[in-house]
Every structure is written in structure tokens, then in C-alpha cells.
């Protein structure tokens, strides 16, 4: 049962790809329940990296006054 719940946590974080805030909510709730599960910590690191990347993009867009797109394309 414990392993199934842990697998569900990891599956949910994968399903929430591109939504780092929601991913962090899930993993932050799971860490106290599974303090020795490496997969939860890896999911937390990926979510935090995604949150930083999202923050950087939004900050750049705000500071520069335009949307930053793929390299070579500025709108």
C-alpha cells in the first residue's frame, strides 16, 4: 500500500508537468510521509527548477517589456 501511494505521488507530479507550483504542493505534502524516498526528492528538485525557470521567464518579460520566445524570435 505504501509503495502504491508513493507511485501515485510521483505519477501526479508527472501529470502536472509544466505546473511547478502544483507539483511543489504535492511533493511538499509527500516529503514528511516519505522522508527516505529518493523519488520524492527528485520530483521536488525538478519542480523547484521548473518554478525558477518560470519565474525567470516572467521576470524577463516584465523587465524587458516584451515576451521572450525561442532564440532568434522576439515579439
Image: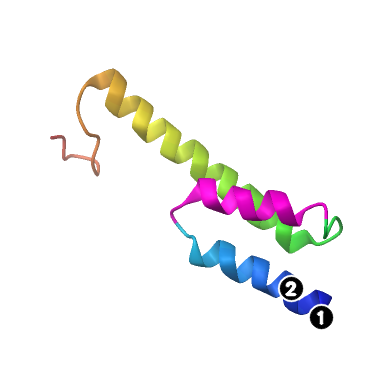
Q: Which mark is residue 28?
A: none
Magenta-drawn stretch, dominant element (helix, strand or loop)? helix
Q: Is residue 30 left or right of residue 18?
A: right
Whether the residues at callouts 2 and 1 have beta carbons within 8 Å, the answer is: yes
- Residue 49 on image: x %, y %: 55, 43
In the displayed structure, would residue 74 be above or below residue 23?
A: above
**Nearer-the-camera pick, 35 or 53:** 35
- Residue 16 on image: x %, y %: 49, 61
Report helix, strand or loop for mark 2. helix
Q: Which residues are magenta?
A: 18-32
- Residue 14 on image: x %, y %: 54, 65
Q: Is residue 1 left or right of residue 73?
A: right
User: Mark 2, residues whose alpha carbon is within 10 Å: few (<14), some, or many (≥20)?
Assistant: few
**Nearer-the-camera pick, 72 or 32:** 32
Question: CA gap, disc 2 to disc 1?
Answer: 6 Å
At x 22%, y 33%, the residue is 67
- Residue 11 on image: x %, y %: 59, 71
Q: Is residue 19 magenta?
A: yes
Report which quarter residue 66 is drawn in. top left
At x 77%, y 53%, the residue is 31
Residue carrying label 1:
1
In the displayed structure, would residue 30 be above or below residue 10?
A: above
**Nearer-the-camera pick, 24 or 43:** 24
Report which quarter residue 4 is drawn in. bottom right
Residue carrying label 2:
5
Q: Is residue 30 magenta?
A: yes
Amino acid at each position: 500500500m505504501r509503495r502504491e501511494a508513493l507511485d501515485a505521488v510521483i505519477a501526479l507530479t508527472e501529470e502536472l508537468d509544466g505546473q511547478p507550483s502544483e507539483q511543489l504542493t504535492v511533493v511538499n505534502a509527500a516529503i514528511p510521509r516519505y522522508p527516505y524516498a529518493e523519488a520524492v526528492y527528485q520530483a521536488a528538485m525538478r519542480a523547484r527548477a521548473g518554478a525558477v525557470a518560470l519565474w525567470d521567464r516572467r521576470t524577463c518579460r516584465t523587465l524587458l517589456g516584451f515576451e521572450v520566445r525561442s532564440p532568434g524570435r522576439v515579439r
